[in-house]
Amino acid sequence: MQNTALTLFCPGKSCKCYQSTENKITKDGVYITKSDFEPRQMFYCNGGKHRFSETGYSDLFGKHGSFKEYEQTAKLN
């Protein structure tokens, strides 16, 4: 089996550890949105001392639709 683990980095452009692979990122709970009952992962940037969501890495950041809706839209392109 191939290792498919991704290197996590801070997506916050104002963070001193922005996109640094040397920075330690840890899981920090989950949350549920009103439009999607699928749990979303939260992370903690140890260098910048702040939390961010798993969608912080994507164009989905700040959007409140369900992952299913985004997946269906992406297939249309």
Image: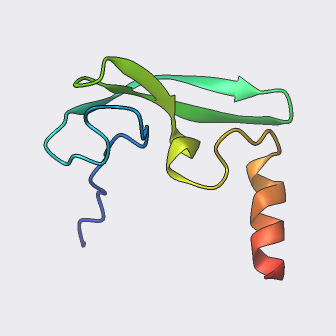
Q: Nearer the viewer, residue 29 or 21?
A: 21
Residue found 83% across the figure and 68% down from its top: 73
Residue found 77% across the figure and 78% down from its top: 75
Left or right for 27, reference 22: right
Report which quarter residue 46 is drawn in.
top left
Q: Position of residue 25 (x, y in %)?
A: 28, 33
Left or right for 44, reference 57: left
Quarter that holds the N terminus: bottom left
The relative height of residue 77 versus residue 31 in the rendered view (above or below) is: below
Report which quarter residue 2 is drawn in.
bottom left
Q: Residue furthest top?
A: 49
The relative height of residue 77 versus residue 68 in the rendered view (above or below) is: below
Q: Position of residue 7 (x, y in %)?
A: 26, 53
Q: Nearer the viewer, residue 35 or 59?
A: 59
Left or right for 55, reference 32: left
Q: Position of residue 49 (x, y in %)?
A: 31, 17
The relative height of residue 67 versus residue 76 in the rendered view (above or below) is: above
Quarter that holds the C terminus: bottom right
Q: Position of residue 56 (x, y in %)?
A: 53, 42
The relative height of residue 42 versus residue 55 in the rendered view (above or below) is: above
Residue found 48% across the figure and 29% down from its top: 52
Q: Nearer the viewer, residue 13 or 8?
A: 13
Q: Residue furthest left?
A: 22
- Its colouring scheme is rainbow
Q: Residue furthest bottom?
A: 77
Number of numbered labels in the structure image: 0
